[in-house]
Amino acid sequence: MQPMIKVENLTKRYAGVTALNGVSFEVGRGEIVGFLGPNGAGKSTTMKILTGFIPASAGQVTVAGCDVFEESLEVRRHIGYMPENNPLYVDMRVGEYLKFRAKLKGVARSDRAERVQEAMERTGIADVQKRVIGQLSKGYRQRVGLADALLHEPDLLILDEPTIGLDPVQIRQVRELIKELGKQHTILLSTHILPEVEMTCNRVIIIHRGKILASDTPENLRKTLRAGGVVNVELRAPLEEAQSVLQALPGVAAATVTAGEDGLVHAAVEAKADADPREEIYQAAVRSGWTLRELTRSRTTLEDIFVQVTSEEDEAEEDRRDERRSVLR
Amino acid sequence: MRNVPTLLRREMNAYFASVLGYVVLVFFLLVMGVTFAVIVQYLTRGPTQMTAMRIMFSMFWLPSMVVVPLITMRLLAEEKRAGTIEMLMTAPVTDFEVVVAKWLGAVVLYSLMWGATAVYVLILKKFSGGTASLDLGPIASGYLGVLLIGQFLIAVGVLTSSLTKNQVAAGVMSFAMVFAFLLVLNWMDYLLQGGAMGKLIKSLSAFDQMEEFARGIVDLRTVVLYLSASFWVLFVATRVVESRKWR
């Protein structure tokens, strides 16, 4: 089956600035993919190209098998799009706006009222349908944007920063809604908030300075990027002995033991890739007759990965710049 | 052009959901009402060659210069500023459909305004008595001229609105262009009497054209000129809207 989105070597240059530099990725049907990157990484640009709002400078982009430039109108029929900042006609009433949008999107007259009603119910805005959009809270407006994206039952939802500017309760509601929608639609959403992708997406694409740095499930990213993470241990044991014993365990990459109060020691144990040394540590403690007070594994969060990946890239960039400088001298 | 009726309805709603539509309508009727009163007052002084509606139509430029920028400056500039243009252009509609609907919306509003002045014709009919029966032919062609010139000025307004995201800048630009087209051209017509250049200017002068329409002469060349000019201007506006794609 052909993928929902296929992007090959996508490059976008604005006057003097390269926003996207040879980006390639695919999104399969039914996936919820999170586009993760700092501000200005090229997330919105990619989405604008996917929806046909702006064209690419180079590269091939297809949505549901249609070229976004050649068959733009056809592509737009497949996509429900919520742009950044969710622009709406603030002078219109919710129901009126959605009816207008349904007409524009070519929803058949006989289905129109039903679709509008359904979209409003799914996003929980049926009770505000008579209100003017400009007077709604941001959370409600965001849902109007989502309802609009759903109107023509598109195969693909593209949501640019769907939770930006919402309060925590609203964020939770919108995330729940996205998860719910993911059961029936393919979703590509962008965000620079990490917990968001961890919670809602089954795949993450990390994009930085117009390039894709990583693309995998949140779990796999954690595995490959920072191995087994760090295990925090608190023991009643002599410091040097604990250091040497822990260091020698097969699943341990490095151990740093520091003295705590009351004769306790703290150990931060870095696990080797794909290893979980907690049982080894417990058994070692039993063998040596230590009392174990804490044994917890701190999982690497996506945040760590994100910071790691983007800063590695930044360092590499700096090295290259230094090299260039030294060559010039 | 399938989506034009849908978009047009939204445009009409936008005029009358905000105060803009009403304010412009009131302004227009105030200016025209005062003008009409002055004309009637003037005609009661004694017999003249002119009819009330002919003088009325010759004043068409005065409200146009204010009304056209007011009702067109918002059209595309505001969509760009608010970002709603992205919603619009990522729906399955073409750029030309959007531009045409915006133009048509303003033309409909403009026609409604002028349509309201038909009341003056009724007033004239009631009070002119039996002495001078009202000749409806020149009045109809006069309205045609007003509509024809107006729709072109509105197309120009749509174009200036597509050039910027600042409504006021768009309004000032369209005012300048309407001013140049109406008054500067008329002034050049006055300066350059005769010669090829003078002839060309004369054939383009909206004042002269309006004069003819108000006398009951419908010159097909003028009709074709204005319709094709509007089409061309709207085409350019569409290219400007599309220019986001190659900038």
Image (cartoon, coloured by chain):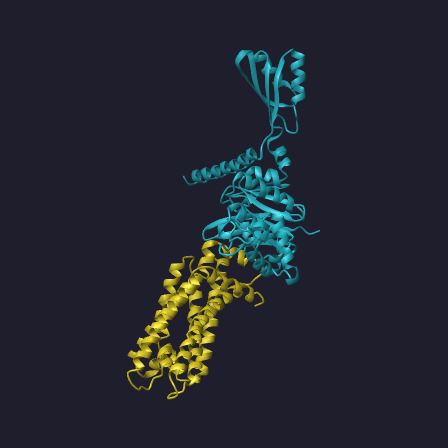
Q: Nearer the viewer, residue A210 or B3?
A: B3
Q: Is residue A302 visible?
A: yes
Residue B87, percent across and down?
Answer: 53, 55
Q: In the figure, what tint was chain B given? A: yellow
Residue A232, percent across and down?
Answer: 59, 22
Q: In the orientation shown, which residue stands out farthest toward the right?
A: A1
Q: Nearer the viewer, residue B134 or A226?
A: B134
Q: Quadrant of residue B4?
A: bottom right
Residue A328, percent across and down?
Answer: 42, 41
Residue A179 left/right relative to B237: right
Residue at 34%, 84% in the rendered image = B50
Q: In the figure, what tint was chain A given? A: cyan
Residue A139, percent across and down?
Answer: 53, 45
Residue A273 left/right relative to A85: right
Q: Is residue B72 visible?
A: no
Q: Quadrant of residue A32?
A: top right
